[in-house]
Image (tube, rainbow, N blue to C red):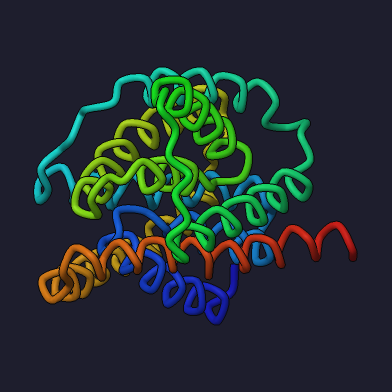
Amino acid sequence: MNEPTIAAMFLLTLTAFTVRVVTGFGSAILLSPIFSNLMPPKEAVVLIILLESFVNLIFLFKERMNFSLKEIYLGAFSGIAVGILFFGFLPQEIIGLAIGIGMGIMAAVMLFGVDLKVKRTKPLFLSMGFLSGAMGVITGVNGPQIVIALANQGYAASYIRSFMITYLVVIDTVTLSAFFAFGHVNSEILADFFALAPSILIAYAIGSRILLRTDGERLKRIILGVIVLLSLVVSLRYGGGLIG
């Protein structure tokens, strides 16, 4: 990969992971459609998971983990297994477009204050965990499904952020292990990872400062706003792939 491309990817990674530090998620949503235009789409997914795993190491030392809502993890592990099984066969364009449209609509509805709470949360969290695990493997987008479910049920922004940090630490580790086990990590992807990794250290410093100045209600609106905005990026990327 040439130097201008790496430089552009460095800035994109810095931006995406600043969002991740502030909200607890979002980096994969932004990077997946853009990186897929700069390198083979499936290699882009693997690279993103490597980058996610690096920021997860920082979170393990800097953040308090939140291992609640076990049904989400159960669903996610099942989804990862299905995603790995069909990784080379399912059409990324159709799946990515469906994710982009769906998460954008749900987040926009909640931003306008519409109450969509359900009484039986375990089936909701189990199914959202499954979608998150499977879609994370196939497209690299594994956070919005869980964020939307938690926001829908009225969880506080600080809880959503801490849960998503913990959840993605676990899920990204399992996904990365599966990628290594099935031989999807190659030397070119590792070289790109080492070139981009320093941007994540800078992103953590910037994101931490932003977070100190953000109250709970504002953070929740930022979280939902990020989903709406980045759903457009995902929809345009995968919708454009279907058209052209």
Question: How many labels were placed on the picture?
Answer: 0
Residue, x 53% and y 70% (percent of image)? 229
Residue, x 90% and y 65% (percent of image)? 244
- Kindly give the residue lying farthest to the bottom in the view shown: 4
Q: Quadrant of residue 22?
A: bottom left
Q: Quadrant of residue 39?
A: bottom right
- Kindly give the residue lying farthest to the right in the view shown: 244
Residue, x 17% and y 69% (percent of image)? 211
Is 9 left or right of 221, judged from the image as shown? right
Q: Quadrant of the N terminus?
A: bottom right
Is 92 left or right of 173, judged from the image as shown? right
Residue, x 48% and y 29% (percent of image)? 180
Question: x and y percent of residue 7 in the render?
Answer: 47, 78
Question: x and y percent of residue 59 in the render?
Answer: 18, 48
Question: x and y percent of residue 90 in the render?
Answer: 76, 34
Pick whichever, 32 or 117, lies toward us: 117
Residue 120 lies, with reference to residue 23, above or below; the image says above
Question: x and y percent of residue 152 in the render?
Answer: 41, 45
Residue 76 lies, with reference to residue 99, above or below; the image says above
